[in-house]
Amino acid sequence: MTHETEHTIELAAPAEAVYGLIADVSRWPWIFPPTVHAERIEGDDAEEVIRLWAGAGDDVKSWTSRRRLDPAALRVSFRQEKSAPPVASMGGEWLLEPLPGDRTRVRLLHDFTAVDEASTGWLEDVVDRNSAAELAALRRVAELGPELEEVMLTFDDVTEAAGSAADAYEFIDRADRWPERLPHVVKVDFREDEDGVQTLGMETKAKDGSTHTTRSFRVGFPNERIVYKQLVLPALLSVHTGTWLFEPSPDGARVAITSRHTVAIKRSAVKDVLGEDATVQDARRYVRNALGANSRATLRLAGEYAEGKAR
């Protein structure tokens, strides 16, 4: 039996700008709370196949979808090509309607079936919960307008090592061993499913002695990259996604390791965390320094590990 749902929201943003956020799936991990990672695997700006990883409760589900993009009609239709149980089939549309005063009505439609009747209620709850979260997040980001560039920050730290990409990847992939390998990691709670998707709870120690607890989903592409999304965030951030990249030299004897962070500053928390006189620019510098310090320490040790293996 096919079930159909519709969720609607109005945004204080132009329809063309909202369409751009929906059409570019590379932005989805920092727009939509359930999305861990999304990428185009084939196609173009008219029709594409994308793969997504999204949180569903304590687990991550992955699937591929074919999308048709129609910027003139402000419509994006989607249909899962390979669904993950308990989903048997899933499709739908994003429909955008321009309203007076540079406002937009967004309708998100779904039609779906479950693998069995017992899973139907669970699936309905997930679709309702994720749709509401996605629309609320879309409104929050779209209504930022020009302020979006101020609160968003992406930066890289890079190191090179005389070792293999496989060994460097292994150091980062085996986060269950980080308490013995990384001085700033106090303890971890680590779980990996049969598809290689990891759930990582981590307590880290800052230079001032304070500790911070985070929780992330991680997706690995062996010896190439590991992408992640933090689910439990420090007070200053509303979004934190990242990528570890491993790029071997042509002869395979060296590897460049990159730690890339994309964060969104929570404007309402800046003064509470950094003081009454603090600005978003102060928060950007603070976050860049804090995350960068841990990244550079991890990169250095990952490089040393790869070089030790090579020797």
Image (spheres, rainbow, N blue to C red):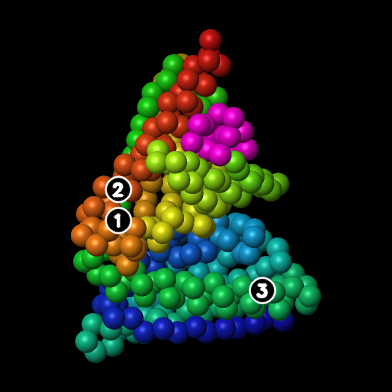
Among the two numbered marks 1 and 3 on one chain, the one whose residue lies closer to the N terminus: 3
The answer to whether any part of residue 10 appears in the image is yes
Which three-letter amino acid code belongs to the residue tagged 2?
Tyr
Residue at the image position 42 percent from the left and 31 percent from the top: 297
Q: Nearer the viewer, residue 92 or 122?
A: 122
| Residue count near mark 2 (Cα–Cα under 10 Å), binned few <14, some 14–19, many ≥20 | some
Residue at the image position 52 percent from the left and 64 percent from the top: 34
Q: Nearer the viewer, mark 3 or mark 2?
A: 2
Q: Is residue 299 above or below residue 308?
A: below
**Residue 302, x across and y down, in percent:** 49, 27
Among the two numbered marks 3 and 2 on one chain, the one whose residue lies closer to the N terminus: 3
Residue for badge 1: 274
Say whether residue 181 is magenta.
yes
SS for callout 3: helix
Q: Which residues are magenta?
A: 171-186
Q: Evaluate if marks 3 and 2 touch, with contact meaning CB atoms under 8 Å apart.
A: no
Q: Nearer the viewer, mark 1 or mark 3?
A: 1
**Residue 166, x across and y down, in percent:** 55, 26
